[in-house]
Image (cartoon, grey):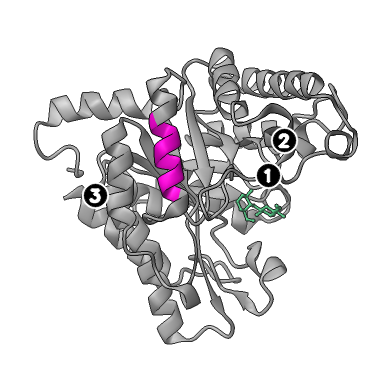
């Protein structure tokens, strides 16, 4: 029995179902039914276990593909649902790669987190290089959100609607959207997404917002305000990009719980725990603690519905490309062998099922 099922099981199950929304009910196919897997361990805990998926690796690497299917019950496109990928020219959409992921997920009994509709990064050149009027930009944004959410209607169960909207000091990030449209672009984005798929759960998502700090305070205030105004915001996404040298934030659970109290879901959306290389036994042990501390917070919260790692193997992780001298940030090594972090995550899920 999971944390939400031990007491008042029926009532709590109803609440959990209402909160977690319209996950398609596809039975696990035999290939994904390995009882020793993470996804098997997560079953019954109320928390889905997900990974970001690199579509090149999914196409070319059979061992990678098998591990995505075996270990996870939720997938997120690492890149192929971003604006530059889906709308390379204005009004010309290319869903091919994203559709391949959605089809893969369906075939393997997995749900899909959509990432992401509005961001300051990975936007197409036509959007960032042209000087549009505010009215044009508003139409561009609305058309994009409508087209994307409609295309995946019923097939994507959570959307990161607005990604990384705040600076670490809690002020709104200076983006083309804020400049042209003002802070109201956030509420508009959620309204447009909700119109396009009323059943999808709509998230704010950011990094450095795991614990209680200026950034998460800003999200708390915004979420409260938007909910009071009837804006369809359903979730608070915590990316969870940790680094051993900066430590593990210690106010994650109270942070997640205050969003619980606002009536929104929470999700850990992009967890990885990087370290300065070379890795050693102590770092690898500390890394396992980093991964499990976020999972524990999720399992201890009432409405934390999913925990996603941002890539599961060091073979394809984004970290070494961005942080010089750092890496080893995922639960599987470059040979796709599980590290202590993998076993720690699995054991944590198993404890939560009792
Ligand atoms: O992992 C993604 C990497 O392949 C891309 O090059 C990068 C470009 O911005 O984006 C990475 O994913 C980011 C995610 O979309 C949003 N949160 C931070 C992630 C790591 O940078």
Asked whether the viewer can see residue 303, the reply is no
Q: Secondary structure at mark 2?
A: helix
Kind of element beneath mark 1:
loop
Q: Is residue 218 magenta?
A: yes
Q: Which of the pair 86/222 is nearer the observer?
A: 222
Residue holding disc 1: 174
* Residue identifier under label 2: 179
Return the residue found at the far left: 7
In the image, the segment drawn in magenta is: 216-224
**Quick check: can you spot residue 242?**
yes
Q: Residues within 10 Å of mark 3 (few under 14, many from 20)?
A: some
In the rendered image, residue 108, in percent from the top left (x then y), is placed at 51, 37
| Foreground disc of the pair 1, 3 | 1
Q: Residue at the spot x=60%, y=67% of the render?
A: 314
Residue placed most toward the observer, 274 or 98 = 274
What residue is at 30 percent from the left and 26 percent from the top?
A: 17
Q: Upstream in the sequence, badge 1 or badge 2?
A: 1
Real-space Cα distance between discs 1 and 3? 35 Å
Residue 300, which numbered label? 3
For residue 58, side relative to residue 207 (left or right) = right
Give the image location of residue 166, x and y in percent.
56, 46
Q: Compute the Cα span from label 2 to label 3.
A: 39 Å
Proximity of marks 1 and 2: CB atoms separated by less than 8 Å = yes
12 over 48 or under it: above or below: above
The N terminus - image quarter: top left
Q: Is residue 6 left or right of residue 256?
A: left
**Label 3 secondary element:** helix
């Amino acid at each position: 029995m999971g944390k939400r099922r031990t007491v008042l099981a029926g009532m709590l199950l109803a609440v959990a179902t209402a909160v977690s929304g319209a996950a398609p009910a596809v039975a696990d196919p035999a290939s994904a039914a390995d009882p020793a897997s993470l996804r098997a361990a997560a079953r019954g805990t109320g928390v889905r276990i997900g990974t970001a998926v690199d579509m090149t690796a999914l196409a070319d690497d059979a061992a990678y593909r098998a591990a995505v299917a075996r270990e996870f019950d939720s997938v997120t496109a690492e890149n192929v649902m971003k604006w530059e990928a889906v709308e390379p020219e204005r009004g010309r959409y290319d869903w091919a790669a994203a559709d391949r992921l959605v089809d893969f997920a369906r075939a393997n009994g997995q749900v899909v987190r959509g990432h992401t509709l509005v961001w300051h990064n990975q936007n197409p050149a036509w959007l960032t290089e042209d000087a549009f009027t505010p009215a044009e930009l508003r139409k561009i944004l609305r058309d994009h959100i409508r087209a994307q959410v409609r295309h995946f209607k019923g097939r994507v169960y959570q959307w990161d609607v607005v990604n990384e909207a705040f600076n670490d000091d809690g002020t709104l990030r200076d983006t083309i959207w804020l400049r042209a449209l003002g802070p109201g672009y956030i509420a508009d984005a959620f309204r447009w997404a909700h119109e396009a798929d009323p059943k999808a759960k709509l998230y704010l998502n950011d990094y450095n917002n795991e614990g209680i700090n200026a950034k998460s305070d800003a999200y708390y205030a915004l979420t409260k305000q938007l909910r009071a105004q009837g804006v369809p915001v359903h979730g608070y996404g915590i990316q969870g990009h940790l680094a051993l040298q900066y430590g593990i934030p210690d106010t994650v659970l109270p942070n997640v719980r205050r969003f619980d109290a606002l009536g929104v879901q929470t999700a850990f959306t992009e967890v990885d725990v990087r370290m300065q290389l070379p890795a050693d036994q102590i770092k690898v042990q500390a890394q396992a603690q980093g991964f499990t501390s976020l999972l524990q917070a999720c399992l201890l919260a009432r409405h934390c519905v999913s925990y996603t790692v941002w890539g599961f193997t060091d073979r394809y992780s984004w970290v070494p490309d961005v942080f010089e001298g750092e890496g080893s940030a995922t639960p599987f090594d470059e040979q796709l062998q599980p590290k202590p972090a993998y076993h720690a995550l699995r054991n944590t899920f198993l404890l939560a099922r009792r």
